[in-house]
Amino acid sequence: MKKTLFKSVLLGAAALVALNAQAENRLFIEDFEIAPGETKTVTLKIQHDDQIFSSIQVYLAPVEGLTFGEVYEPLLLAEDDTYPTNARGSKMAVTPAFNFDDVANQFKIVLANMANGGDTYNGNRLVAYWSTGTSYLADIEVTASEDFKGAQIVCEYCKASYDDPQAPASYIGHFELENVVVCNVTTPASGTPLADIVATGVNDQEYTVADALKIVSRAPKAGCVFVSDGKGNWMKVAAEGEVYDAIAAMDCIAANSLTGVLSDAECNQTLTVTAAPKSATDPVAAAATAWNLAQSDPTSAQYHFAPKVNEVILLTGYYFASEGAFRAYSGVNKGQSATVDMSWCNTETDMADGALYKDVECAVQLKEAWEAETPAGAPAHVKASDDLAFQNYIVYPLSVDATQILTGVENLNASKDVVSVKYVNAAGMVSNTPFQGVNMVVTSYADGSQVTTKVVK
């Protein structure tokens, strides 16, 4: 039954059924908005002053970019939720027919047998009665193509046959319509690219994101998800209750469907939404980025720890609870570091103090907005390109467990040759392999130095 319609217009506002000469009647669908790629159901209605019909036929022109899909069992209801009845007061059994005519290139909706097969009662044909006013004929499923730009729905031909209300056996004739607009179909206003929102977004302004977005990670404790457009731009999306649950259940968000108010535009941007967007059918290529605080290659783009605000990263570094930070090295030379806040973590894990963790999933936030120039005496106010830029970051681990702890020769920060790795348990026993439970890991280097960390196996 589904058929792509590719002419100019679909259903539109029109007058149908002047079932008596003085009445102004029309066939119509309420004007509606549909996004490219979206499917929605619209209702075909008839407004009339007369009450008796024996058949209604509607022929809709094909519309470029719109597909007529399922036509649901016709409602055949008046505004007061009453079904049409016959002369005996019984509900009529109307026979509907819906199909696309390839020869005529028309979509047909036919409501027949409204005269109940020509049966009579007290000499009168059993035609269908409606209450005077607006009646609902059928629900029609409509799908817009990905490049749909808007159109009109047009009724090429409509014929409504009716009888004399006082003498239903007396066929009066029919009302005909040709080439009338049934409704206007528009698309939502185009959204703003995420890159532009991130770069020039205005605080407290509402934005619709033009891009399809990948939900890279979720932070239910904070009531937010972190999304990316796959082009290096990131945003924190906040929501509550069922809206959050709906968003968190998605993999990707459809373009032009996420609308929210931007806050804290100069620092940690958040788009707060109150309605769930549409889930995208096509995937968006975006993922967390690996960062090693002890990157030793000065030619690497990650030589300086400088992720983007709201970026989801996989962080490798030593965790020190006393400092509330991940840092590059375990010894006196701390190297680069990042302040840690565990309040968004989705796993209940006590991180091992002094242990080296690999690929801890974290969301990145700033302590303060970046400065164009570094103010004197205020090292926290730094440019993103400064060597001390890492001082301005807070990382929020979202998930972490003991399997991410690295030991011995696995140490990604080791710039010196490892001579040996020994494991010491709580009883003072020494082994070349870890004991069950708490281990003190003693790593000896060729230069004679040692590093001791605590690991739980």
Image (cartoon, rainbow, N blue to C red):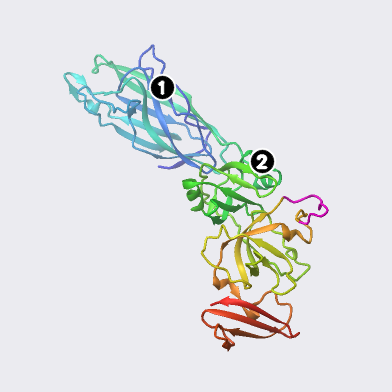
Residue 371 on the magenta span: yes
> Which secondary structure class fits the magenta region best?
loop
Residue 203's disc number? 2
Q: Amino acid at mark 2?
A: Asn
Residue indicated by mark 1: 16
Tag 2 secondary structure: loop
Residue 16 in the image, given as x and y percentages of width and height = 41, 22
Residue toward you, 138 or 437: 437
Residue 307 in the image, given as x and y percentages of width and height = 69, 58
Q: Say which residue appears at 56% left-offset and 34% top-offset.
A: 150
Residue 319 in the image, given as x and y percentages of width and height = 64, 69
Q: Say which residue appears at 51% left-offset and 44% top-offset.
A: 276
Locate residue 215: give its quadrant. bottom right
Looking at the rendering, the stretch of residues picked out in magenta corresponds to: 369-379
Residue 169 in the image, given as x and y percentages of width and height = 23, 18
The N terminus: image quadrant? top left
